[in-house]
Image: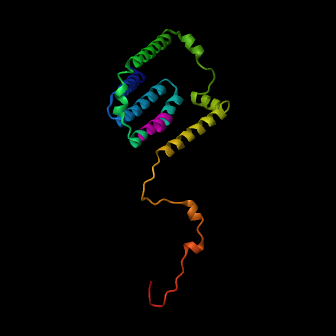
Amino acid sequence: MQADAIFFWLFSGALIVSALVVILARNPVHSVLFLILAFVNAAGLFLLMGAEFLGMILIVVYVGAVAVLFLFVVMMLDVDFAEMKQGFVRYLPIGGLIALVVAAELVFAIGYEWTRSPAAAAAAAPSGTLSNTAALGRVLYTQYFYFFQAAGMILLTAMVGAIVLTLRHKKGVRRQRVADQVARSPASAIELRKVPSRAGL
């Protein structure tokens, strides 16, 4: 068995197991941690397919930002997940129907890929000598530069909004007030006292 086949079965098996644990785990923190493991294994599969850009995006964006944000939200907000799961049985038929549709689409896509001839696959491959990362970077920073920057501003706004919504001020904790510090004058900050000799304070 070749090395790429061994890594494929290793990554795919770990991905399936971690995805099942995400759904079946009772502790939401454990679910988020196994979600991170699923993202890492999916990134390994993308690297095996030659799509290194998608693999790095999974690591940087999803593992480094989205999954960690989920973990902080679960730990900070103290959400009652037992109450949220009470309507699980009611929505089970709709969820099962959606799962069947997605499974049928996957079977159709995999069957089409297997039946396609090598000549058609070679014709569908992009021409040129640029790698996937270089080609995507050239498109993002030339043709879609403004949309890329707009997406970054939207994500920054969402991050600031999440911080503002979860920020709680505790009573009795002294905080720095920059405006008061800047507005201080020498008369209000310094007190001069005339102390007699050998009298002390």
How many marks are shown on the rendered structure? Answer: 0
Q: Quadrant of residue 133?
A: top right
- In the image, residue 144 lies at what x, y percent? 65, 31
Stretch in magenta: 61-72
Q: Nearer the viewer, residue 99 or 62?
A: 99
Q: Locate the C terminus by quadrant.
A: bottom left
Q: Locate the N terminus by quadrant.
A: top left
Q: Nearer the viewer, residue 187 or 43?
A: 187
Q: Nearer the viewer, residue 18 or 2?
A: 18
Identity of the residue drawn at 51% across and 32% down: 57
Q: How is the image coloured?
A: rainbow
Q: Residue furthest bottom?
A: 197
- In the image, residue 160 lies at what x, y percent? 54, 44
Q: Quadrant of residue 84?
A: top left
Q: Nearer the viewer, residue 45 or 76?
A: 76
Please give left or right for residue 87 compared with residue 190 in the image. Answer: left
- In the image, residue 61 lies at what x, y percent? 50, 35
In the image, residue 138 above or below residue 9: below
Please give left or right for residue 34 compared with residue 120 in the image. Answer: left
Identity of the residue drawn at 33% across and 27% down: 24
In the image, residue 57 above or below residue 198: above
Identity of the residue drawn at 33% across and 32% down: 82
- In the image, residue 53 lies at what x, y percent? 54, 30
Q: Quadrant of residue 189?
A: bottom right
Q: Is residue 77 magenta?
A: no
- Magenta-drawn stretch, dominant element (helix, strand or loop): helix
Q: Is residue 66 magenta?
A: yes
